Image (cartoon, grey):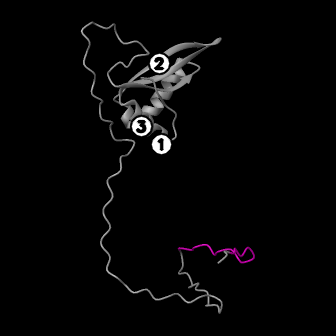
Amino acid sequence: MESVIDTGSAAETPVNVDRPAAPSVPPPTASAPKPAAVAARPTAPAPKPAPLTTIDQPLPKQASAPKPAAAKPAATASEPASGGTMVQLGAFSSEAKANAAWKNLSGRFGFLKGLTQSVAAVQSGDKTLYRLRASGGNGGDICRRLKTAGESCSVIG
């Protein structure tokens, strides 16, 4: 059976909540097929869905790797500062813009508040860019949640 859209018919009437609406049941047409009677059968109850994870729930901390015997220097901007992996949240034209972006993101997404934020200046041609990064959690999970919310993110290490 082929579907047909009647573009010549009148538009639907808006719903008015102030007064009762008149019933708008169209009269049956001779060409419309009659609905078949369906016997009522008992159905099994549907299983309950698993609870959804929201973007404001805290992320689980990733277990840190065992420390090597040799002492390492203090963490630099390219290394995760507090365990886990590092994610880059953006590159900005000024350090102030990078810090403002962190304030915005950590305010919107509660799971970012426990992470360590850093801004690293890098040369790109004749310009200086300021990379906004965060560390201390599972970078893959952080980026997945941010991307689901429409933000950009990339796992660094």
Q: Earlier in the sequence, mark 2 or mark 3?
A: 3
**Of the residues shown, which amino acid type is indicated by label 2?**
Val
Residue name at image x 46 percent, y 37 percent: 146
Tell me if residue 10 comes above or below residue 70 in the rendering.
below
> Which residue lies most toward the bottom here?
30
Tell me if residue 63 comes above or below residue 20 in the rendering.
above
Q: Earlier in the sequence, mark 3 or mark 1?
A: 3
Residue 7 falls in image quadrant: bottom right
* Majority secondary structure of magenta residues: loop
User: Which quarter shows the C terminus?
Assistant: top left
Residue name at image x 43 percent, y 39 percent: 145
Question: How many marks overall?
Answer: 3
User: Which quarter shows the N terminus?
Assistant: bottom right
**Of the residues shown, which amino acid type is indicated by label 3?**
Phe
Question: What residue sits right under mark 2 in the picture?
Answer: 119
Tell me if residue 72 comes above or below residue 85 in the rendering.
above
**Of the residues shown, which amino acid type is indicated by label 1?**
Thr
Question: What residue sits right under mark 3 in the picture?
Answer: 109
Q: Of the numbered discs in the image, which one, if any, rests on residue 118?
A: none
As rendered, which of 31 and 118 lies closer to the eye?
A: 31
Question: What residue sits right under mark 1 in the picture?
Answer: 148
Residue name at image x 45 percent, y 29 percent: 103
Q: Which residues are magenta?
A: 4-17
User: Disc 1, disc 2: CB below 8 Å?
Assistant: no
The percent coordinates of residue 152 (x first, y second) are 52, 33
Q: Earlier in the sequence, mark 1 or mark 2?
A: 2
**From mark 2 to mark 3, how far is it between C-alphas?**
19 Å
Mark 3 element type: loop
